[in-house]
Amino acid sequence: MEVYLDNSATTKVFSEVANMVQKVMLEDYGNPSSMHNKGLQAENYIKEAKDIISKNLKCQPKEILFTSGGTESDNLALIGTAMANKRSGNHIITTSIEHPAIIETCEHLRDLGFEITYLPVDNNGRIRLEDLEKAIKKETILVSVMHTNNEIGALEPIEEAGALIKKINPSIVFHVDAVQGYGKFRIMPKKMNIDLLSVSGHKIHGPKGIGFLYINEKIKIHPIIFGGGQQKGMRSGTENVPAIAGMGKAVELIYKDLDKHIDELYELKDFFIKSLSEIEGLTINGLTGRDSAPHVVSVSVDGIRAEVLLHALEDKGIYVSSGSACASNKPAISSTLKAIGVKKELLDSTIRFSFSVFTTKEELEYTVEALKELLPMLRKYTRH
Amino acid sequence: MFSSFLIKYGEIGVKGKNRYLFENALMQQIKYALKRCEGSFNVHKAEGRIYVDALGDYDYDETVANLQCVFGITGICPVEMLDVCNPESLKKAVVDYIGRNHDTKDHTFKIHARRAHKNYPLDSMELNALIGEAVLDEYEGLKVDVHDPDYLITVEIREKIYLYSTVIAGPGGMPVGTNGKAMLLLSGGIDSPVAGYMISKRGVKIDAVYFHAPPYTSERAKQKVIDLAKQVAKYSGPIYLHIVNFTDIQLAIYEKCPHDELTIIMRRYMMKIAETIAKETECLGLITGESIGQVASQTMASLACTNEVCTLPVFRPCIGMDKQEIVNISEKIGTYETSILPFEDCCTIFVAKHPVTKPSLEVIKRHEKHLDDCIDEMFKEALDTRETLVVTSE
């Protein structure tokens, strides 16, 4: 049995999406910038995708910019805003549990002379509004907060933060990294005071290498990629039409029955956590139920190294991730887990299960059985 | 434009009646290395020398780099080939050649002409004089030095005329396949690929054994070892890589023997398994990357303990080297970058905080007795379930 529980790393593409991508690649392969009809056909795919996404976000189509994915969206949001607004100030606020696409970009901006404040989080991985309020000063030009944490599924108080920021200073740009939250929640930037919103295609059963950045038409932002002037000069480079069309399709499908899907995911999560509670020596990190993301369960396993458990589960066809999946190319201790105060000896013993619409109760039952079988055996042989 | 390479080889030249065996092995290894290069080549022997002729377009730098991986080659001379022509044209061609390939300010040279075809109108001495004079006339900055010239310009007259003057160093050693075969214990570390490289340099063909311990070691760790074998195979030729599942044996040792002796006992079983496979596959020795005192399992006492299980000779070419010296070689042969990838290998997973450094063979043997009830079966299982891959450099 293959059980894929690493959906926060990436998801299986919907077959409708794959068909769409293939059709564009094989039939409607024109360059949207070409004058001829083949180009127009391609352009129409982009329009259609923009329509789907802008309706979903309740914004204008021209406020959607296609990028190569979450990382590029984050880079553009931070660097582009910083560069366009540096006359107004040099202070940027973010949180201590952001994805490296945010943290590393902030560090780069620090090298360029910007001042960065990292907000602490509570034991459940949530920022406190009073910390945010205290951190804002007259030089602050940008606040960036993630919607849903990728490692423990913490939900940040985005709406409240947006309201607070705009109350203090309406010209501060508010960026939200919604790579993990989009497709799980309805996000309406205008209502939530979000000026910039990063989204990735492959976390919502779309293709890899595609994403978008919602950019409020009123804010100032500079491009970070230059060239042929595509997408109104904000992001040069021939548009990745097949992937854009595919992502549009994925957005359509994932939001079609969102409430039903989400109810099911929460049911699965509750069931899984309840089943895990029968096993000794496990700690669930962060909040559970509706106070947390529906698709992420972070578990610390007393006395077993995450990597070993991961490979043992793999042997049974179960795919999970240790800490944050992006870390498999550089095994470093997760900053999120440290920030929420996970005990030192458990930092290296934390694995993440993440679900998708394809996840079934049977798969989770199988996983719980596998854990019950494996944990006593693995505990017997530990490094000392 | 160089269109051929003259291959110089060292020790083979003195191998008496077996010389042709060595030369054939060298040619075979050269052909293997050239498979990695763009273009096609003719490797041939002519009058006791080996030539690599490029047939059409090829990438000079890539070709030289790959020839530099062939053991047995001491030097690679890039050769310009001309059709046989009269002495006047030849004179011009050599002058032109020097202008294109050498700095003509303040250097010395010597013309070294040879006639394989004795019917050429001038003999070697006459050619030397004729061409030398033309070069002196053309380039004021060049002087003749017949004893220690900066440039030794060789002009060979055969079915074509070969012009060459530079020697690019080869790796030396002996052609692989001329000295039997040995079994390398390949881990994911820095030392063992270097050890394999060094033994291979002496003409020994290599097979390898890798111990993996799922779920304690990952598929990526295994892939890393395959990648290392692939890099070593650039020098050693194709490697049969035996992948042995060591988990059960390791866990049994962990459970039944003292933890501070775990690594030593484990290594003894690794050696035993490696030797069993070695004997099955006609290897004449084992190769390890051990270096005295590098870690607890490589102290003199530990080495003596692990060595004791083997009857085949165990070659440890890194034995007297410092870590940095080993690192230097691994950088040179291109295995370092892969070796330092951070995947756990099975030697480190259960390692004790304070492993024994002076194990007593007697004590170790007594503790190994705790495994008597299960070890034979596990040993057989490990051998039977091994996976064997042929790793080539292509």
Image (tube, rainbow, N blue to C red):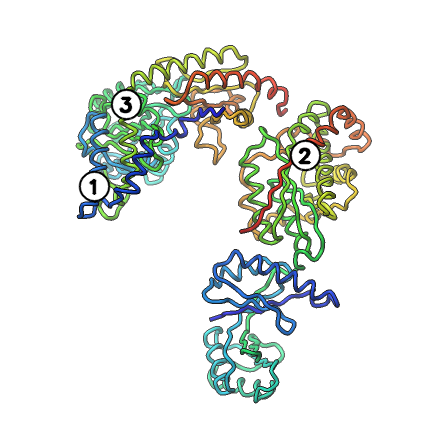
Q: Left of A135 or right of it: where is A122? A: right
Chain letter of disc 3?
A
Mark 1 against mark 3, which lies toward the viewer? Answer: 1
**Few, some or many C-alpha atoms within 10 Å of disc 1 (few <14, some 14-19, many ≥20)?**
some
Mark before the other along the chain sequence, 1 or 3: 1
Q: Name the residue under label 1.
A: A41
Numbered label attached to residue B384: 2
- Amino acid type at mark 2: Asp
The reply to whether dot 1 and dot 3 touch (C-beta < 8 Å) is no
Residue A177 visible, this orientation: yes
**Residue to which mark 3 is pinned:** A255
Q: Are marks 1 and 3 on the same chain?
A: yes
Q: Which chain is mark 1 on? A: A
Residue A22 picture quarter:
top left
Relative to A8, is B76 above or below?
Answer: below
Residue A314: image x %, image y %? Answer: 52, 27
Residue A253 on image: x %, y % = 29, 25
In the image, B62 versus B103, the foreground residue is: B62
Q: Say what amino acid the circle numbered 3 marks.
A: Tyr
